[in-house]
């Protein structure tokens, strides 16, 4: 294992805890994480990690028509890059290499979140505030290393009408159960696709049945669980494939007790679309997308409507779309 340790991060309790989990690790101190992260790396990065301090705390308003439309909503970043390798993922074009990065200054990030909540409340906004945590990494998949949820789930419990959503393709929920609480302000949202699509496009991620088992376990423990059907892929025979998938899913999961359901097809901004095409030249579906009036590149409106009708048939009107 090779760990690049930023000098300003080496005294962090989180960094020390991560380093203590490895008996055989080569630690290389660096001045700034971008000295490594912003370079094209020619050697395998699977057993490499960067521990850094976020010197520019990352908290961004979400785009229009993303997620919960009845809330003030923001992305925040504690990690970069993902342990899974999904062929369609926009992260393939976002960074110069695949090194996972963990920003270990959790207290600073939490202070930024607290300030945003207080700022909105001081401005007399009393509605729901949502923070999306997983847009640059699968945090559940990294939990046994980063202990993200161990720190942030209790943090968000301090507030009213606040929700943190983490999206995942991982079944590894034991560390969540080990928290010993049933949080009111955290939603674990599982990305789901038919197993054939997982096999072909979602490399290294958990099998569908293991994700379903994790969902059922969390539901039984009264956690807030969300379902994220994204991206819906118009592979040959997609309507029949997804109908069979939904029919079987509804037999296994208690849909009535799902906290939220969101759908999305393949969608990119133009820059990410061009970048991912260079890295995934054999991904045929990328060649059949349309550039909309809003500048986003997505699956055609006709196909989106077909998916919408199919999912409403099985899941009802409670479904919502990201970027319809």
Image (cartoon, helix red, strand yellow):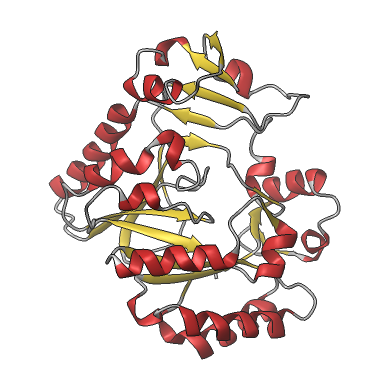
Q: Residue furthest bottom?
A: 313
**Residue at the location (61% across, 68% down)?**
193
Q: Describe residue 259's horizontal placement relative to residue 127 as left or right.
A: right
Q: Tell me if I can see residue 230 in this picture.
A: no
The picture places residue 201, in percent across and down from the top left corner, at: 72, 58
Residue placed most toward the observer, 295 or 160: 160
Q: Describe residue 322's horizontal placement relative to residue 279 as left or right.
A: left
Residue placed most toward the observer, 119 or 257: 257
Q: Tell me if I can see residue 98 in this picture.
A: yes
**Residue at the location (25% across, 41% down)?**
116
Asked if 6 appears above or below 113 in the picture, the reply is above
The picture places residue 279, in percent across and down from the top left corner, at: 79, 43
Q: How many marks?
A: 0
Q: Quadrant of residue 81?
A: top right
Asked if 208 appears above or below 62 in the picture, the reply is below
**Residue at the location (38% across, 19% down)?**
16
The picture places residue 269, in percent across and down from the top left corner, at: 64, 52
Q: Quadrant of residue 267?
A: bottom right
Residue placed most toward the observer, 123 or 262: 262
Asked if 313 appears above or below 142 in the picture, the reply is below
Q: Residue furthest right?
A: 282
The picture places residue 161, in percent across and down from the top left corner, at: 20, 58
**Residue at the location (65% across, 63% down)?**
266
Asked if 181 appears above or below 250 in the picture, the reply is above
**Placement of the C terminus among the 4 image quadrants:** bottom right
């Amino acid at each position: 294992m090779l760990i690049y340790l930023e000098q300003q991060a080496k005294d962090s309790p989180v960094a020390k805890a991560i380093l203590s989990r490895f008996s055989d690790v080569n630690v290389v101190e660096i001045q700034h994480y971008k000295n490594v992260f912003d370079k094209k790396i020619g050697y395998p990065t699977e057993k490499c990690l960067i521990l850094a301090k976020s010197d520019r705390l990352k908290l961004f308003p979400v785009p229009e028509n993303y997620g919960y439309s009845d809330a003030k909503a923001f992305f925040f970043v504690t990690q970069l890059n993902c342990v899974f390798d999904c062929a369609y993922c926009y992260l393939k074009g976002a960074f110069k290499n695949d090194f996972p990065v963990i920003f270990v200054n959790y207290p600073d990030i939490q202070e930024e979140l607290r300030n945003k909540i207080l700022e909105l409340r001081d401005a007399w906004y009393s509605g729901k505030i949502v923070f999306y945590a997983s847009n640059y990494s699968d945090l559940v998949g990294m939990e046994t290393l980063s202990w993200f949820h161990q720190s942030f789930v209790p943090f968000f419990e301090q507030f009213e009408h606040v929700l943190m959503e983490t999206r995942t393709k991982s079944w590894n929920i034991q560390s969540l159960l080990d928290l010993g609480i049933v949080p009111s302000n955290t939603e674990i949202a599982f990305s789901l696709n038919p197993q054939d699509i997982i096999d072909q496009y979602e490399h290294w991620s958990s099998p569908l049945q293991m994700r379903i088992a994790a969902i059922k376990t969390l539901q039984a423990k009264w956690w807030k669980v969300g379902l994220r059907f994204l991206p819906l892929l118009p592979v040959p025979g997609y309507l029949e494939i997804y109908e069979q998938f939904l029919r079987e899913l509804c037999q296994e999961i208690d849909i009535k007790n799902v906290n939220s359901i969101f759908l999305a097809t393949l969608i990119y901004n133009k820059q990410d679309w061009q970048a991912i095409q260079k890295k995934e030249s054999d991904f045929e579906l990328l060649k059949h997308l349309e550039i909309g009036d809003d500048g986003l590149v997505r699956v055609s409106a006709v196909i989106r409507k077909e998916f919408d009708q199919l999912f409403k048939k099985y899941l009802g009107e409670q479904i919502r779309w990201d970027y319809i």
